[in-house]
Image (spheres, rainbow, N blue to C red):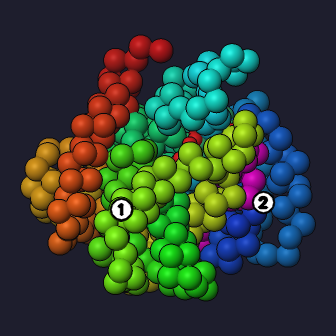
């Protein structure tokens, strides 16, 4: 019996994600928590003729505690999204029409994620936690540090959701191959982190090869499209936020993989931004491979009943990909440290 909880369930991602989870027959209970609107979202979803029993909770009357009680898996899309000209505080009329980076969201989302993580650590410390809220490269370390403070951190159970990068890479490769019907079967490992240059698609390891005459400049363009796919959506939405529907799809895909693996299905592998202590041998080998002692990295992870079963190394890279990995490391390190020190020495 799986109880899934969505924190931030009334939002742009939260609602379609809750819909997809409600349609998942493996889920028997679905609890929705947000600071607004969850009773309505839950009532709406509860009329769908699938097994999951849906309930909505708000902060009053211990709503977070009630939502989390008995949780097996908790997905967190709570927090503010990027918008063009987002200034970290409010929408300024004189903002430049540019897309700021996910790190601009830290000021608000760090505190939101910390408080939700405190709730999980207290009420459902054994739950598998899937973090969507940006900046993922910092919010995952925030959750880990909160769990450590409560003495309940198990790195095997914490995941930063980077599946949207993988979904995008598969789709873009299918477009290049001229056959979108291939997209569901294409798999491209995307490693590193989830922000700009920290997103590293390993196109040389795509299950479906790129055309033989694919030029270096086309490869560079495709790589940048995956790295900055989020900007494409933010610009197109023109002030209405960032990716929600594709993220809900990706989040539901990843949640389903975790649930299946926990239920004993073998052979499930997916990239995720994880704490490398989740598998010491695999984590150490990865650190050696990238030449940097980072505590977190997104890489292919073998999933099992306890969560992370094995961390895979990156394998054979082209020199172009090696360059991308090295270019990702400084920003990754800064973002990870920012998340860790937010809990160690809160400044906001
Ligand atoms: N990991 C990824 O690949 C990825 C992809 C897309 C978006 N995101 C991130 O996901 C987050 C949510 O995006 P969105 O478009 O759904 O935003 P949104 O504003 O539409 O929804 C966010 C929801 O969070 C709720 N919320 C705020 N504070 C809360 C709290 N303390 N407790 C519970 N709920 C709270 C809001 O009420 C809102 O309903 C953003 O940070 C965005 O950057 C991540
Ligand atoms: O781009 C964003 O801010 C949202 C998300 O991280 C994405 O990749 O679409």
Residue range highlighted in magenta? 1-18
Residue density around tag 1, few if under 14, some if 14–19, many if 20 or more, within 10 Å: few
> In which quadrant of the rendered view does residue 290 lie?
bottom left
Residue 12 lies in the magenta stretch: yes
Q: Is residue 5 left or right of residue 191?
A: right
x 37%, y 31%: residue: 339
Q: In which quarter of the image is ligand 1?
A: top right
Asked whether mark 1 and ligand 2 are closer than 8 Å, the reply comes as: no
Between residue 170 and residue 81, name the one nearer to us.
170
Residue where numbered disc 2 is placed: 54
Q: What element carries label 2?
A: strand
Q: Where is residue 207 in the image (x, y as percent from the top left)?
A: 38, 82
Mark 2 residue crowding within 10 angstroms, few (<14) / some (14–19) / many (20+): many
Is residue 290 at least partly visible in the picture? yes
Residue bearing the label numbered 1: 217
Residue found 40% across the figure and 65% down from its top = 218
Q: Where is residue 158 in the image (x, y as percent from the top left)?
A: 40, 52
Mark earlier in primary sequence (2, 1): 2
Position of residue 264 relative to residue 4, above or below, is below
Q: Does the magenta stretch include residue 339?
A: no
Vertical placement of 94 versus 138: above or below?
above
Position of the N terminus, as image quadrant, is bottom right
Residue pictured at 75% horizontal, 63% vertical:
19
Q: Can residue 255 be seen in this view?
A: no
Q: Residue 8 placed where, x, y %? A: 67, 43
Element on which disc 1 rests = helix
What numbered label is drawn on residue 259? Answer: none
């Amino acid at each position: 019996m799986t109880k899934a909880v969505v924190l931030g369930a009334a939002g742009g991602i939260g609602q379609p994600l809750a819909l997809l989870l409600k349609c998942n027959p493996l889920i028997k209970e679905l609890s929705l928590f947000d600071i607004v609107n969850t009773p309505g979202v839950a009532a709406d979803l509860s009329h769908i003729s699938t097994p999951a029993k849906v309930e909505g909770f708000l902060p009053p009357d211990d709503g977070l505690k009630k939502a989390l009680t008995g949780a097996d898996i908790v997905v967190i899309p709570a927090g503010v999204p990027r918008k063009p000209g987002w200034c970290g505080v409010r929408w300024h009329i004189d903002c430049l029409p540019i897309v700021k980076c996910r790190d601009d969201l830290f000021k608000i989302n760090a505190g939101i994620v910390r408080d939700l993580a405190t709730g999980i650590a207290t009420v459902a410390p054994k739950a598998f936690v899937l973090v969507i809220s940006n900046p993922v490269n910092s919010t995952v370390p925030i959750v880990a540090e909160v769990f450590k403070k409560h003495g309940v951190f198990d790195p095997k159970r914490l995941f930063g959701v980077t599946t949207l990068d993988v979904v995008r890479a598969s789709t873009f490769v299918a477009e290049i191959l001229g056959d979108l019907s291939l997209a569901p079967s294409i798999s491209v490992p995307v490693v590193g982190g989830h922000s700009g240059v920290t997103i590293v698609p390993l196109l040389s390891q795509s299950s479906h090869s790129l055309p033989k005459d694919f030029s270096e400049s086309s490869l560079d363009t495709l790589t940048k499209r995956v790295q900055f796919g989020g900007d494409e959506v933010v610009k197109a939405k023109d002030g209405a936020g960032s990716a929600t529907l594709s993220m809900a799809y990706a989040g539901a895909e990843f949640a389903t993989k975790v649930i299946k693996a926990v239920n004993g299905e073998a052979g499930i592998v997916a990239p995720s931004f994880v704490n490398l202590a989740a598998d010491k041998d695999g984590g150490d080998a990865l650190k050696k491979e990238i030449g940097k002692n980072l505590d977190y990295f997104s890489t292919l992870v073998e999933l099992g009943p306890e969560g992370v079963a094995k961390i895979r190394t990156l394998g054979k890279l082209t020199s172009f990909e090696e360059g991308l990995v090295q270019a990702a490391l400084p920003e990754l390190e800064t973002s990870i440290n920012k998340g860790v020190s937010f809990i160690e020495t809160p400044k906001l």
